[in-house]
Structure formats: C-alpha cells, structure tokens
Amino acid sequence: MASILREEESYLWPDAVNGASLAGAELVATYPRRSDVPRHLWTELLRGAERTIDLLAYAGLFLTEEHPDWIPTLTAKANAGARVRLLLGDSKGKQLGYRDAEHRIGGGVAGRVAAVMAYYTQNMPPAVEIRLHDTPLYNSIYRFDDEMLVNVHVYGILAAYTPTLHIRRIDGAYYNTYLESYERVWAGARPIEEDDL
C-alpha cells in the first residue's frame, strides 16, 4: 500500500513504528543546496498552507525574485485568515554585519534585507506580521502549516549553496525542534519602525 501511494509506511501508520523511526519519517527529502529544491515545491507548499505561514531568514530575497506569485499568494492567504509571520534581519543589529563579513560580500546582506523589506512592506496587508531579528542564524526556516523547508547555514557559504531539509510533522521530533527555534526568535524580535523603511 505504501509503495502504491508513494509514501513512507511510518507516515501512513505512525503508531506502527518506534519513536526514532517516526522522527526519521518526518524527513521527507534532503537537498544538497537550497538551489536544488524544486521551484514548484516552494509554490505548492505556499498554496497548500491554510493556517500558518512562517518565514525566518535574514532576507529570503530569492522568494520574491524567483516566484512571481509569492507576494500575491501570501496576501491572499493572510486575507483568507492564515497567520503569516515574517522574521527578517535587523539592519540596526550586529548579525547582518557578521554574516556580511563571513561571506565577504561588502554590504550585500543588508542590501538584500532592504530590498526584501521594500517588497513586503509595500505589498502586504496589515494582517501580515513582520518583525526584525538580530540573532545568529543557523537555519532559515520556511513553515507552511505542517511542513517546513529548513535551509541549514554553513560558515562562509552562501545559503543558496547549503543543504535544505523538507520536514513534515508526524510526531514532531524534527518539526517541533525547528518550530521552537522559530518561536524563540519571534519572541525576541522587534516590530518594524518607520525609520527601518
């Protein structure tokens, strides 16, 4: 049955496996680079989300640049009642400068954050919550209801070239770890002020 449906047995019958196997079943796919994640997957996950869309990145500019329907779909989801929360890098903090020095791109990280802030603040309805964070970012997290794409950051390598995990909540062992991280960053982040724009 599992092979016919092209799903893992542990996904179809979570009570039939032990905790370690169940946690492993949450890992749907791994990609050696974020740029290897199929473009359609980002769109499918966004379109399929009905309750929650969360983003944690310094910029995540590729979403607005490579997916023309990203902002209109986020807007539609927020207007339909989904909770949409965006956590972006705080240009007033220290972490963007550290990441910039790490990648040796001469102010590029702050510039990307400014560009994505312009996209989001000019086009998003008030229902979309945007906060700024100044945390060392070990992962970028893109949550769509019970699925996530987690871009694992590696020192000195641009995020587009580092691994990405596709996680689907089953028992929560993988999923909840990243969700807890997201919530901690959200709790410590600040709202956008007029001089941030």
Image (cartoon, rainbow, N blue to C red):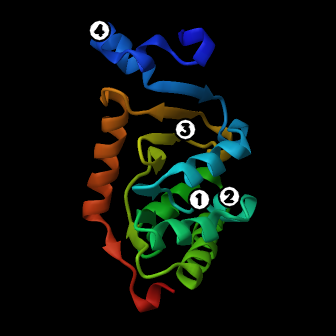
Between circles 1 and 3, the one closer to the viewer is 1
Residue at image x 43%, y 18%?
Answer: 12
Query: Amino acid under label 2?
Result: Phe
Query: Amino acid under label 1?
Result: Gly
Q: Residues within 10 Å of mark 2 (few under 14, many from 20)?
A: few
In this rendering, the count of numbered labels is 4
**CA distance for labels 4 and 3:** 31 Å
Between circles 2 and 3, the one closer to the viewer is 2
Tag 3 or tag 2, which sits nearer the N-term?
2
Between circles 1 and 4, the one closer to the viewer is 4
Q: Residues within 10 Å of mark 1 (few under 14, many from 20)?
A: many
Q: Which residue is mark 1?
A: 60
**CA distance for labels 1 and 3:** 16 Å
107 sits left or right of 166 in the view: right
**CA distance for labels 2 and 4:** 38 Å
The one nearer the camera, 121 or 4, is 4
Splitting the image into 4 quarters, where does residue 119 fall?
A: bottom right
Residue found at the very far bottom of the displayed protein: 194
Q: Which residue is mark 3?
A: 154
Query: Amino acid under label 4?
Result: Asn
Q: Which residue is mark 2?
A: 62
Residue 45: percent from left, percent from top: 57, 47
Q: Is residue 181 visible?
A: yes
Q: Is residue 158 visible?
A: no
Residue at image x 53%, y 81%?
Answer: 121
**CA distance for labels 2 and 1:** 5 Å
Query: Amino acid under label 3?
Result: Val
Tag 4 or tag 1, which sits nearer the N-term?
4
Q: Which mark is residue 18?
A: 4
**CA distance for labels 1 and 4:** 36 Å
Residue at image x 47%, y 33%?
Answer: 167
